[in-house]
Image (cartoon, rainbow, N blue to C red):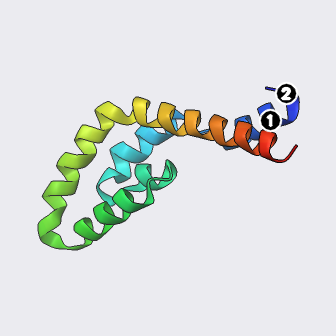
Amino acid sequence: MNTSRLIRYEANKRSAAMAAVFCIFFGFLGLHRFYLNQKRSATVMLILSLVGAGLPVTIIWSIIDLFRVGDMVDAYNNDLADKIEQHYYTSR
């Protein structure tokens, strides 16, 4: 990875610590999933949280996600690196 691609990656990668903080404090709203660009599941979590009966479901979901957040961040960062590489090769 050359310097410009590395700079782009570093500027856009996600932190596991930050995702965990979002998950702990705002996980029931799906904020950690929005942070990791998982918009569909994040929207489902948000809607379920706003509907009172769905709140227990999202709380349990966010607790499960807390154990998975490291893998979720790794997947996001790996996808980001792949997209940067693909962009580099298609723009040449």
Q: Residues within 10 Å of mark 1 (few under 14, many from 20)?
A: some
Q: Nearer the viewer, residue 68 or 84?
A: 84
Label 2 SS: loop
Seen as rendered, the residue at the extreme top is 1
Pointer 2 with pointer 1, Cβ within 8 A: yes
Residue drawn where x is 42% and y is 30% of the image: 70
Q: Is residue 48 left or right of residue 89?
A: left
Residue 72 drawn above or below residue 87:
above
Residue drawn where x is 30% and y is 64% of the image: 44
Residue 35 drawn above or below residue 66:
below
Q: Is residue 65 left or right of residue 35?
A: left
The C terminus sits in image quarter:
top right
Q: Position of residue 6 (x, y in %)?
A: 78, 31
| Mark identifier at residue 37 | none
- Report the amino acid beneath label 1: Arg
Q: Is residue 32 left or right of residue 91?
A: left
Q: Nearer the viewer, residue 78 or 30?
A: 78
Task: Identify the image quadrant of residue 42.
Answer: bottom left
- Report the amino acid beneath label 2: Asn
Q: Which residue is disc 2 drawn over?
A: 2
Residue drawn where x is 11% and y is 68% of the image: 53
Q: Position of residue 78 (x, y in %)?
A: 57, 33
**CA–CA distance between discs 2 and 1?**
5 Å
Residue 22 drawn above or below residue 39:
above
Q: Which residue is disc 1 drawn over?
A: 5
